[in-house]
């Protein structure tokens, strides 16, 4: 002991010494009391267990344990199993448990005797009954996932990696898996009536229906006979615990029930089946691991199945420099610049030396010349970044994988601050889940960010990854940052279960191979059709099922090596063939009994059978069969059959372009089924030929259309758009701003909401502008133009796809699909336009080009800025009741009336249906009576008078820009083109010789989006504070109508898809009688106004024509006051259409209104006020009401004046229609209840024939 004088301890209250002495005594007394209570309960449980024959008792406890609601009380059932096995056989009664009454009485007594385990039963496992599966070889086997160990499926994979396939350990594990699978097949249903969420420790008596199924199932499990002797227990086996404390420790280490079966009366019976997998894992937990090289190879193989081949270099590898080799073996290197991860397995024996090994690895990585060597060879390589240099040492991360696999609770301290640590189980969870190496990098960044809150130290990586996915990498929602943050310890288990359940729900009976891990796809088909995509390779498979055989049509893009268009055709065949067989599987199955579990048909083509990259003369291929070659692939195992198919793509196109029924689908089916019969050595029966031929009259499910390219964009585009985490960061920034402005949490409505929203909008707008100002002008404009064009091209392609699907059957909701796509496109496209129009005003050249990360972050902020603009405008214009909620984290939520969301969703579906032409009669659309030449001549003259170009020249220059590759302006299709003015003008003149070069240049100057005008409104010489998103018709300089951008060197930048939209806007607006904006062009305005007047009159004429087809009597444009002046009728205006059906005494009035299109909330308010009025003015509906009252009051007089016959003896009824050129939200959902029906003119015929119409 040191002789130094100790510091005097702090002197506490006089009672302190007394408490310090008494507290341990009190704790010990309470422990003794709890143990006495536990021992008493054990005696009571044992007494209940011995009331019946031990075999029946074991069955009863198994049934109770397996009943779904009782998963909340697994520790109680472990106690029952343990006490049961520790009781000698002679202690049991010989009485048999014969009836459900016996079972129920026994379970009730057992429940009464059970002790409570509040510390051990602290959560309720997932409600799984075979929804999650694991692979045993190629076969998916259902397991009991909701057992005592979380993420048990990942433990299975980790166990296999650790021990290696074919070992006794894995054989034991697979038998335990099959044991659970047999039970689940025997009892596929298991659900209680528990509607409320279960509480931990809950237990109840299983119902008679479950007892009746499980009683025989538990004693008829064939796999039980193959269980190894070490997993079999005899009655009277002493327990591994003595008291409550020991029992708790045994539960935590998985030692309570180390058995799979019990031998009773000489027979083996299944034992605690929920624990079966855990029992095997723990039985082998202390087995020494394989050699580091073999284990590294197995981990590497696991990773290569799940990560793109270009991002994963599988080991085993050694890290080395010229003078030094690191001692630890590397399983794989994961690459996605700027991320480089070295995955390094660490065994139990290596853990003490890991710190030094990591130091060595870091030293080598810091060397100027390091690399990786393949173990056992002289081969090696070096990593290089995008600049061709060795990665920076800080960019290379070391991931240590702790390889021992045990379900026992353990805590491992990271052996080095210069490396990350994960268990082998977490490795399986995370690498089976990540979408890319980049996501892995973002996950580690998320983990590091949680370190400041302390709680992540107590969370395993499974919980961290589950939270990462669920909160989109942003766990801090708002403006308040906690001092300490802990995660739900079951977060990872819950997330992983939902993830696996979804995966297996959409999985085929068997996957195509075990060389890849697969992504399953949601499929709404009622047939067996499934689609899977390989994680590690460009490979897909569509599958169907005949009998018990899964037939995969496999397309490996790398193996077939086709150009995109021919590859697309081959994929079309793969999908068609699988679907066609799935649709006819019930016809085929009685004839074809296949001795295989899996058939893989690898689809290829040949040069002479290609459409786009093949021989010029394709005529010989047209007469050849759809499958020209079928070559069996040798080496298939006994349960599989594989063949290589050569598909005739020329035949595919020829047959499917003119398809009117399912004939080609039958051709595909017959071609495949014939070869399958040949594979089993039998001819295809004639009855099957006939049965399949009868299905040819069905509606086709697949068609092909050959279309001329009209827009020069790549065939496959996918725009980069913000991720959900980007939107969450933007929302958090807004929350921080609200807090800084002194906003208090609460709900704000109407004026109070406006007072909150407007300052927040202004400040947030300034923050957005500040972010934009920091970016380089040209690279930003180029990036946004390309991504915006890709977005438009994708939307065009989606709409075309849905429209084309009208020619054949589909398994999805077309209207819903298109409505969702339109809503998504509208949101994302306006964000890009805002950024482009802001960049023109705010940015200047910078030294560093923009990164996609910065741009996507700003786009997410713009999205939230639009939310604020929208809320402000809705409240300002009185569009809806709404406001803003600010929660206690200052996170904002804009809300509107309860019905608004449902109305907008329904309106979106209906607009999608109109775009698809559902119930639309094209012949009833309102169009001009002018011929095409007269139409263009009138507009050309007006444009030439007001501008230096004609209307035709405007459209022709836009067409030139849209087809820039076709006119020779560029060699390759792109989402963005750059050229000088002169070249564009010359190409336009070449394509359209009637246009002069001066006219072309004039059009180009007009189409340029001038930065000084973008934030200005027509008629106002003032620059606004922002892009005037609140206006439309006054915005003459917006990207949608002037899509050319001038770069710093004077060249022009544009996107072909965006220009095509511009052309549609100009042509569509003018053909509808409106200019795209209020341009001060007197001659053009007069010409367009004349066209609008003609269309307004035409609307009334067209409505009359439609009504005449449906009603026996009709008259157009009658004003009774002026038509019959002697009657002295009041002036109520004219009836645009008045119709009558005497046999039903039904009248129909039609009011025709040619309303101006709506583009912004201000337009919406104007239309609402014009139609429905404001205040005491009831607008157009008020005048309609006067005519209604006039008709009702004078109906007989009016009928006689018109000379129409008297009605039948039926009550008078009146249907009132408001017919317009287009449908608008307010016409679909009026602000107040009216008897008027609102109909779009080209759907009027369908409406009059519907149930809503007079009949």
Image: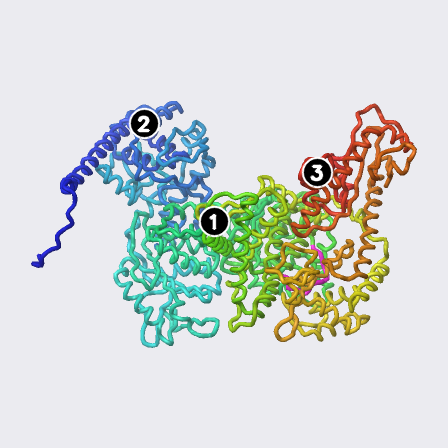
Of marks 1 and 2, the one in the foreground: 1
Provide the major secondary structure of the magenta segment: loop
In the image, what residue occupies the spot 84% across and 43% down? Answer: 1105
Where does the image place residue 632, in percent across and percent down from the top left? 56, 57
Q: Marks 1 and 3, Cα distance to the nearest angstrom?
A: 37 Å
Residue 743: image tag: 1
Choose mark 1 or mark 3, whichever is in front. Answer: 3
Dot 2: few (<14), some (14–19), or many (≥20) neighbours within 10 Å? few
Please give the residue where the numbered disc 2 appears in the rendered image.
112
Which of marks 3 and 1 precedes in the sequence?
1
How far from the left and from the top, in percent, is residue 961?
70, 67
Q: Quadrant of residue 862?
A: bottom right
Span of residues in magenta? 704-715
Is 786 or 137 nearer to us in this picture? 786
Q: Nearer the viewer, mark 3 or mark 2?
A: 3
Name the residue tied to disc 3: 1176
């Amino acid at each position: 002991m040191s002789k130094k004088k100790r510091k005097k301890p702090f002197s506490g209250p006089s009672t302190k010494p007394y408490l310090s002495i008494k507290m341990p005594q009190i704790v010990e007394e309470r422990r003794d009391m709890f143990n006495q209570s536990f021992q008493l309960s054990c005696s009571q449980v044992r007494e209940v267990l011995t009331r019946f024959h031990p075999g029946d008792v074991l069955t009863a406890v198994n049934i109770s344990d397996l009943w779904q609601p009782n998963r909340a009380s697994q520790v109680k059932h472990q106690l029952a199993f343990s006490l049961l096995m520790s009781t000698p056989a002679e202690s049991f009664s010989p009485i048999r448990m014969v009836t459900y009454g016996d079972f129920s009485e026994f379970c009730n007594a057992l429940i009464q005797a059970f002790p409570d385990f509040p510390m051990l039963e602290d959560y309720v496992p997932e409600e799984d009954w075979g929804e999650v599966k694991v692979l045993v070889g190629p076969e998916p086997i259902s397991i009991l996932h909701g057992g005592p160990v979380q993420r048990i499926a990942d433990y299975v994979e980790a166990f296999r990696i650790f021990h290696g396939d074919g070992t006794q350990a894995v054989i034991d594990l697979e038998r335990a898996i099959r044991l659970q699978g047999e039970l689940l097949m025997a009892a596929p249903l298991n659900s209680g009536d528990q509607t409320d969420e279960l509480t931990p420790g809950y237990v109840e008596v299983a119902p008679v229906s479950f007892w009746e199924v499980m009683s025989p199932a538990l004693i008829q499990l064939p796999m039980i006979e193959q269980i190894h002797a070490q997993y079999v227990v005899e009655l009277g086996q002493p327990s591994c615990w003595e008291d409550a404390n020991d029992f708790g420790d045994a539960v935590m280490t998985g030692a309570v029930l180390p058995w799979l079966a019990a031998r009773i009366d000489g027979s083996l019976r299944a034992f605690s089946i929920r624990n079966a997998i855990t029992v095997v894992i723990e039985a082998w937990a202390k087995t020494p691991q394989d050699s580091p090289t073999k284990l590294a190879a197995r981990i590497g193989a696991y990773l290569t199945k799940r990560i793109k081949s270009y991002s994963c270099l599988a080991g085993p590898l050694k890290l080395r420099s010229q003078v030094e080799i690191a001692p630890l073996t590397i399983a794989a290197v994961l690459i996605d610049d700027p991320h480089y991860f070295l995955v390094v397995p660490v065994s139990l024996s290596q853990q003490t030396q890991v710190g030094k090994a990591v130091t060595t690895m870091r030293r080598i990585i810091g060397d100027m010349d390091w690399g990786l060597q393949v173990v056992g060879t002289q081969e090696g390589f070096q990593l290089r970044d995008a600049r061709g240099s060795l990665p920076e040492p800080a960019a290379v991360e070391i991931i240590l994988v702790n390889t021992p696999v045990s379900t026992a609770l353990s805590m491992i301290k990271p052996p080095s601050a210069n490396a990350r640590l994960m268990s082998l189980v977490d490795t399986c969870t995370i690498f089976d889940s990540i979408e890319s190496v980049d996501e892995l990098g973002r996950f580690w960044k998320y983990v590091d960010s949680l370190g400041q809150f302390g709680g992540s130290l107590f969370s395993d990586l499974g919980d961290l990854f589950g939270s990462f996915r669920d909160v989109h990498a942003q766990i801090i929602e708002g403006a308040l940052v906690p001092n300490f943050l802990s995660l739900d310890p079951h977060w990872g288990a819950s997330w992983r279960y939902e993830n696996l359940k979804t995966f297996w729900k959409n999985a085929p009976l068997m996957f195509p191979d075990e060389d890849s891990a697969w992504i399953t796809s949601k499929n709404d088909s009622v047939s067996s059709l499934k689609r899977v995509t390989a994680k590690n390779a460009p490979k897909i498979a569509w599958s169907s099922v005949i009998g018990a055989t899964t037939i995969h049509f496999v397309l490996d893009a790398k193996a077939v090596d086709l150009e995109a268009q021919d590859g697309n055709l081959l994929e079309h065949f793969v999908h068609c063939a699988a679907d066609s067989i799935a649709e006819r599987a019930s016809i085929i199955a009685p004839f074809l009994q296949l001795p295989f579990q899996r058939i893989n048909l690898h689809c290829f083509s040949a040069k002479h059978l290609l459409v786009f990259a093949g021989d010029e003369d394709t005529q010989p291929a047209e007469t050849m069969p759809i499958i020209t070659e079928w070559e069996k692939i040798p080496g298939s195992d006994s349960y599989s059959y594989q063949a290589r198919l050569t598909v005739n793509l020329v035949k595919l196109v020829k047959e499917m372009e003119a398809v009117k029924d399912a004939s080609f689908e039958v051709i595909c089916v017959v071609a495949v089924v014939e070869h399958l019969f040949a594979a089993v050595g039998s001819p295809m029966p004639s009855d099957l030929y006939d049965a399949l031929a009868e299905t040819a009259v069905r509606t086709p499910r697949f068609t092909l259309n050959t279309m001329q390219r009209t827009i020069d964009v790549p065939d496959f585009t996918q725009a980069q758009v913000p991720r959900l985490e980007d939107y969450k960061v933007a929302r958090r920034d807004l929350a921080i701003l609200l807090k800084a402005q002194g906003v208090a949490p609460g709900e704000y409505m109407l004026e109070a909401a406006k007072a909150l929203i407007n300052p927040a909008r202004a400040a947030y707008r300034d923050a957005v502008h500040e972010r934009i100002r920091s970016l380089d002008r040209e690279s930003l404009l180029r990036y946004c133009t390309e991504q915006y064009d890709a977005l438009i091209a994708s939307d065009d392609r989606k709409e075309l796809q849905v429209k084309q699907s009208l020619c054949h059957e589909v398994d999805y909701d077309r209207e819903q699909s298109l409505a969702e796509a339109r809503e998504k496109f509208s949101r994302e496209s306006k964000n890009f336009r805002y950024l482009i129009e802001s960049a023109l005003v705010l940015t200047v050249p910078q030294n560093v080009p923009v990164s996609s990360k910065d741009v996507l972050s700003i786009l997410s902020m713009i999205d939230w800025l639009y939310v604020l603009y929208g809320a402000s405008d809705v409240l300002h214009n009185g569009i809806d009741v709404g406001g803003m909620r600010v929660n206690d984290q200052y996170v904002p939520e804009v809300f509107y009336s309860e019905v608004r969301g449902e109305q907008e969703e329904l309106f979106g579906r209906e607009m999608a249906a109109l775009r698809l032409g559902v119930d639309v009669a094209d012949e009833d659309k309102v169009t001009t009576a002018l011929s095409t030449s007269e139409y263009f001549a009138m507009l050309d003259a007006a444009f030439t008078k007001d501008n230096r170009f004609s209307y035709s020249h405007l459209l022709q220059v836009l067409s030139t820009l849209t087809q820039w590759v076709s006119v020779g302006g560029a060699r390759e299709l792109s989402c963005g083109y750059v050229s000088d003015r002169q070249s564009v003008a010359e190409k336009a003149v070449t394509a359209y010789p009637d246009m002069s070069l001066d006219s072309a240049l004039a059009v180009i100057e007009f189409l340029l989006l001038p930065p000084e005008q973008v934030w200005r409104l027509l008629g106002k010489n003032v620059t606004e504070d922002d892009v005037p998103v609140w206006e439309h018709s006054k915005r003459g300089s917006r990207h949608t109508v002037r899509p050319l951008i001038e770069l710093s060197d004077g060249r022009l930048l544009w996107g072909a898809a965006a220009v095509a939209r511009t052309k549609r806007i100009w042509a569509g607006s003018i053909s509808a009688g409106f200019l795209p904006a209020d341009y001060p062009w007197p001659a053009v305005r007069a010409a367009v106004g004349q066209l609008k007047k003609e269309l307004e009159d035409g609307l009334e004429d067209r409505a009359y024509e439609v009504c005449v087809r449906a009603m026996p009597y009709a008259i157009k444009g009658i004003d009774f006051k002026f038509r019959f002046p002697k009657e002295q009728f009041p002036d109520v205006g004219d009836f645009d259409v008045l119709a009558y059906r005497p046999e039903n005494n039904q009248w129909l009035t039609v009011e025709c209104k040619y309303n101006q299109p709506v583009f912004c909330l201000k337009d919406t308010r104007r239309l609402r006020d014009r139609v429905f009025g404001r205040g005491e003015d009831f607008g157009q509906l008020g005048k309609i009401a006067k005519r209604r009252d006039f008709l009702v009051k004078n109906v007989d007089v009016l009928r006689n004046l018109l000379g129409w016959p008297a009605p039948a003896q039926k009550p008078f009824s009146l249907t009132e229609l408001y017919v317009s050129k287009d449908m608008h939200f307010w016409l679909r959902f009026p602000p107040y209840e009216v008897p008027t029906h609102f109909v779009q003119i080209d759907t009027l015929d369908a409406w009059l024939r519907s149930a809503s119409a007079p009949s």
